[in-house]
Amino acid sequence: MLYVVTGPPAAGKTSWIEARARPSDVVIDLDRITAALSGPGAPSWAQDGIALKVAHRARYAAIDEALKHLDATDVYLIHTMPSPKWLARYRRHGAEIIAVDPGKDIVMQRIADMRSPALQAVATRWYAQRARQRDARRVTRQASRAW
């Protein structure tokens, strides 16, 4: 099974996965990949730009490979804000899409306490995108015209 875990920065996506994934499952987490590719002592939440670029490439390769093995293992993938194109791709593979969101106030406080202030902009975008998606799902019913 493919689990795509979405949510703003500092929402608890990694904790959600850690509470569910087994040691034999595949976990694709950009933060973990970047940390693995960074030198000793590199900060875990304020990654170097070059290391982050390399990690993105490694993440894409990991996704491509992991999707080939869904019949043999569960795959947990953190994707903060997947585009409609990515969501369609994940759904073609039968993904369960999970949104982890403890609420904007909690997220912003966690970012202020533990993360780079730049992540506040990412969280703000996540909440704005979520609101737009909710608005797009609202359907106004009106009677058809009488011809």
Image (tube, rainbow, N blue to C red):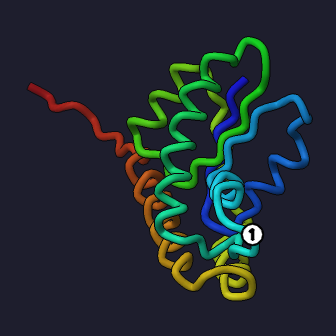
Horizontally, residue 118 falls left or right of residue 66, namely left
Extreme residue toward the top, this view? 71
Residue at screen point 66% across, 31% down: 96
Extreme residue toward the front, this view? 39
In the rendered view, tell whether residue 95 sits above or below residue 15. Answer: above
In the rendered view, tell whether residue 124 sits above or below residue 15. Answer: below
Residue 24 at x, y percent in the picture: 88, 29
Residue 22, image quadrant: top right
Residue 85 at x, y percent in the picture: 39, 35
Residue at screen point 55% across, 43% down: 58
Residue at screen point 83% across, 56% down: 15
Residue 132 at x, y percent in the picture: 40, 58
Marks counted in the figure total 1
Dot 1: element: loop
Extreme residue toward the left, this view? 147
Horizontally, residue 52 falls left or right of residue 40, namely left
In front of the other: 12 or 56: 56
Residue 118 at x, y percent in the picture: 52, 81
Give the residue pinned by disc 1: 40
Residue at screen point 72% across, 31% down: 75
Q: Quadrant of the C terminus?
A: top left
Q: Quadrant of the N terminus?
A: top right
Q: Amino acid at mark 1?
A: Pro
In front of the other: 18 or 103: 18
